[in-house]
Image (spheres, helix red, strand yellow):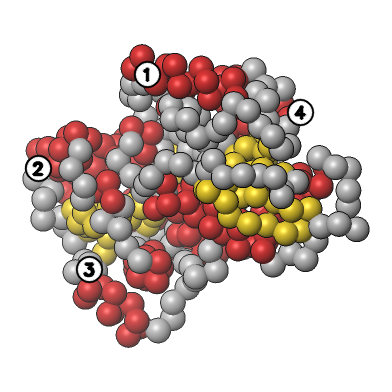
Amino acid sequence: MKKLNIALINPPVAGHKLRGTGTYGEELFRALKKMRRIQVSQVNYGSSLDEFDVAHYPYFDPFFLTLPVIKPKPTIVTVHDLIPLRFPGQFPRGVKGEIKWFIQRFSLQSAKIVLTDSVASKNDIAEFTDIDKERIKVIYLGVRSEFRVIKQGNVLEKIKKKYQLPEKFLLHVGDVNYNKNIPGIIKAFAKLSKKYSDLHLVLVGNGFREDSLQLHQLIGLISEDDLSNKVRRLGFIELSDLTGVYNLAQVYLQPSYAEGFGLPVLEAMICGCPVISSHTSSLPELVGEASLLIDPYNEEDMTNSIEKVLKNKKRRQDMIEAGFKRAKEFSWEKCAEKTLEVYQSLFNTT
């Protein structure tokens, strides 16, 4: 039987590679390459697709032209989330963005199948695009094998010194976008720091170093609460070092208003760091019963939940064990297998 020849299209938008969408493209390609039942190639956007059976676009942006209107091959598109449409006041699109969204939505409707990372995102896609839910398939992402519990104290000590990390800190890894609720983290930390003088906050991600209006607002909030010496803003961190940072943290925080998936949550769990996350959007799907779920709009709820983990060693250990077990259920191999099933369904092959 002829192998299906799959084109995995590299996104035309710069800057996505350091985000979760970049991880998805890389890890899916790596896992698919190991499968003997198909042939898969990474292809630049706009290249000829004559030799391929299926075109898979692993990235979709509502306000940039990341998807062609004319599709010469059966097309699959992965839409990770439509969060900017859920919070239009916080993600202004302008006239050009409105036009591009019209084109993108029109183009998406002619895809054979739309893949997405969670049931929450599936519901958003159906609502904002009018695509039938039968054509939207949920395939959960995985966690990179590099993330693990590090037992060598000397390795952790080296990372601690390299980034001048405090002895006791809360951690968030991500961006400064509105949906991440970073002001909520800072406000909750401000309350906790009055009771726990040795507690610090570490924020990891390019957005916490690169100049932006959001970053200026966060710095203002940090200064306002006199927390400048207790908040560490780190930029991009290499994978091996990030693994160590997760291992060193007391608690990982993901109090987002919305997430398409939430890769850092899995990364923290697999590294043995207890997680506190929102009870909104995809996060309950992801964490199951392994995390304390909070109302992201309620700073007191976040503060109290953090304190519960800090004060109760047994609760913290139980959360670590439950989180590790939960994270092990997600893998890029499973993601690739489910994606292969979607490819095959287009041709009714097995």
Q: Which residue is nearer to you in this view: 219 or 138?
A: 138
Q: Which residue is nearer to you in this view: 349 or 313?
A: 349
| Residue depicted at 71% across the width and 48% down the height | 52
Q: CA distance from mark 1 to mark 2?
A: 36 Å
Label 3: state its secondary structure.
loop
> Which numbered tag is attached to residue 223?
2
Q: Earlier in the sequence, mark 3 or mark 1?
A: 1
Q: Earlier in the sequence, mark 1 or mark 2?
A: 1
* Dot in front, 3 or 1: 1
Q: CA distance from mark 2 to mark 4?
A: 50 Å
Label 1: state its secondary structure.
helix
**Which amino acid type corresponds to the residue marked 4 in the rendered image?**
Glu
* Dot in front, 4 or 3: 4
Q: Which residue is mark 1?
A: 96
Q: Earlier in the sequence, mark 2 or mark 4?
A: 4
Q: Give the side of residue 307 with respect to residue 41, left or right.
A: left
Label 2: state its secondary structure.
helix
Residue 145 x/y as whole percent: 55, 68
**Which amino acid type corresponds to the residue marked 2 in the rendered image?**
Ser
Q: Earlier in the sequence, mark 4 or mark 3?
A: 4
Q: Which residue is mark 3?
A: 163
Q: Give the side of residue 74 with respect to residue 173, left or right.
A: right
Does the CB distance between marks 4 and 3 fall below 8 Å?
Answer: no
Q: Which residue is mark 4?
A: 134
Residue 82 x/y as whole percent: 50, 29
Q: CA distance from mark 4 to mark 3?
A: 47 Å
Q: Is residue 280 visible?
A: no
**Which amino acid type corresponds to the residue marked 1 in the rendered image?**
Lys
Residue 1 x/y as whole percent: 91, 58
